[in-house]
Image (cartoon, rainbow, N blue to C red):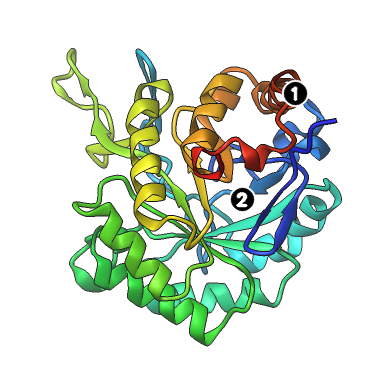
Amino acid sequence: MANIAVTIAGVHFQNPVIAASGTFGYGREYAGIIDVSRLGGICTKGLTLNPRPGNTGIRVWETPAGMLNSIGLENPGIPAFIENELPYLRTLGPVVIANLSGSTVEEYVEGAALLNASSVDMIELNISCPNVKAGGMAFGLDPESAAAVTSQVRNTVTGKPLMVKLSPNAPDLIAVARACVNAGADALSLVNTFKAMAIDIHQRKPVFDNITAGLSGPAIKPIALRMVWELCTALGSQVPVVGMGGIATTEDALEFLIAGAVAVQIGSATFAHPATMIEIIEGLESHLRCSGIASVEKLSLRNT
């Protein structure tokens, strides 16, 4: 049997397929549709210190090769998540990764402190959020801001494995990645959604109340793959990289793993076909077995 288990920042995953944040809720929604226990991990819906209602107006808009979303980090807040959602999530079996967001460094730190005291296995720091103290520019667009929030979370409140989720909209993604690693990140994940928009031609106005939204789906896969390749090339073996962006098939996942990612996150594809992740897990096992490759870790070009 081919070995598809992986280890990320000391955490064992039974396979490299992880449900991406914002696309799998807190596990309940899909538990009656697929065998969730077979997944490698689940990234929670984005969590903030306090509850958020999310954005007003239209939130999802289909595109020819993907979708736009403007959900707005709707969530019950970290205390409610720990009390009401985490106990059930823990019964499902996969690694639990809490996706943490905030509008200030202080919010990130307070939220991380609560998660550190919980049973989550890992924290994924979402730095695509607007830093309200810096005029609304996302933490992840600037190396200094990215390093500041990563350092504060790592050095003051948590000893749990810390994965930082990078924004593809950063002017210098590699510089941001290096800043996060130097500040204490144990792993990196990319890419988050691309900034995009849609216009209602009949009303002659933007579709979303927030004007712009996040683009995901097959349309972004070649760009996301290029970014993962460049990051893995630049950082080498410094930290594990988890790739995502438009992955919908086993072949897509294999491309990211060959490019250097140690695992993949699947998001938008699950909306269209809930069994996508299960099929990718089975496809990876079959590919390794038929190719005579002993483990998923041997797929990377960097291990040949």
Instruction: Tell me residue 85's x, y (percent).
Output: 73, 55
Please state which of residues 106 and 276 is positioned toward the viewer in this rendering. 276
Q: How far apart in space, not on screen, are marks 2 and 1 (Cα)?
A: 23 Å
Q: The disc labelled 1 sits on which kind of residue? A: Glu
Q: Looking at the image, is mark 2 or mark 1 nearer the viewer?
A: 1
Compared across the picture, whether 30 is left or right of 72 comes to: right
Quick one: SS at disc 1? helix
Q: Is residue 246 above or below residue 242?
A: above
Please state which of residues 272 and 243 is positioned toward the viewer in this rendering. 243
Compared across the picture, whether 15 is left or right of 256 comes to: right
Quick one: SS at disc 2? loop
Quadrant that contains the N terminus: top right
* Rendered image: mark on residue 44: 2
Please state which of residues 291 and 209 is positioned toward the viewer in this rendering. 291
Q: Which residue is mark 1?
A: 282
Q: Residue at x 34, y 73 (%)?
A: 147
* Rendered image: mark on residue 142: none
* In the image, farthest residue toward the front: 304
Q: Residue at x 24, y 30 (%)?
A: 197
Instruction: Tell me residue 65's x, y (percent).
Output: 38, 16
Quadrant that contains the C terminus: top right
Q: The disc labelled 2 sits on which kind of residue? A: Thr
Specify the quadrant of the image occupied by residue 208: top left
Specify the quadrant of the image occupied by residue 216: top left
Q: Is residue 32 above or below residue 180?
A: above
Please state which of residues 85 and 18 is positioned toward the viewer in this rendering. 18
Q: Residue at x 24, y 74 (%)?
A: 133
